[in-house]
């Protein structure tokens, strides 16, 4: 494993300072730019995650505001809807969205 470089301490105008070679200084500036870029990417991803979470919350609220599925059963029922729009699942889009949201809100299922 590479040895951690030890800074060279100098006194300049009565104040303690650290001396860097031109190469060390350039590496320091490059590292700062990389960290700044990564920080900006993390900030954008955090904003996207917040917007996505808000979208899911709004979808969940919209679906929950209906109270029942298209056949009048409580949404917790897993039986197919009478007004099925999907031949494979036998449920309407709203019921499928509700099930999808429940599945992603509870990772254990």
Image (cartoon, rainbow, N blue to C red):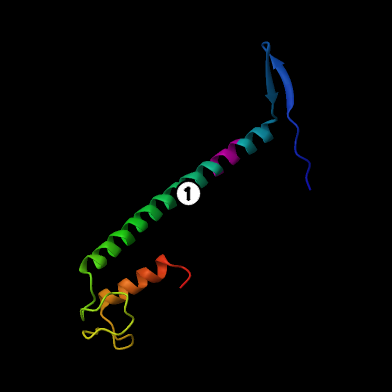
Instruction: Describe residue 13's horizontal placement relative to residue 108 as left or right.
Output: right
Q: Position of residue 44 (x, y in %)?
A: 42, 49
Q: Is residue 83 above or below residue 63?
A: below
Circle 1 SS class: helix
Q: Position of residue 74 (x, y in %)?
A: 26, 75
Which stretch did the figure color magenta? 29-34
Residue at the image point whose x is 26% and y is 74% from the top: 94
Is residue 31 inside the magenta stretch?
yes
Which residue is rendered at x = 32% and y = 59% of the image?
Answer: 57
**Residue 79 placement, left or right of 44:** left
Residue that sits furthest to the top in the current view: 14
The residue beneath circle 1 is 42
Quarter of the image with the C terminus is bottom left
Residue appearing at x 51%, y 41% in the figure = 36
Whether 72 is drawn above or below 59: the answer is below
Q: Nearer the viewer, residue 17 or 93?
A: 93
Q: Is residue 28 above or below residue 60?
A: above
Q: Residue furthest front?
A: 74
């Amino acid at each position: 494993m590479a040895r951690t470089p030890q800074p060279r301490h100098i006194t300049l105008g009565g104040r303690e300072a650290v001396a860097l070679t031109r190469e060390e200084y350039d590496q320091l500036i490059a590292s700062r730019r990389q960290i700044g870029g990564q920080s900006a990417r993390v900030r954008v991803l955090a904003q996207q995650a917040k917007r996505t979470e808000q979208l899911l919350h709004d979808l969940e609220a919209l679906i929950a505001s209906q109270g029942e599925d298209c056949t009048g059963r409580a949404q917790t029922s897993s039986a197919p809807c009478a007004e099925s729009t999907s031949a494979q699942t036998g449920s309407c889009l709203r019921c499928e969205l509700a099930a999808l949201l429940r599945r992603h809100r509870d990772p254990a299922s």
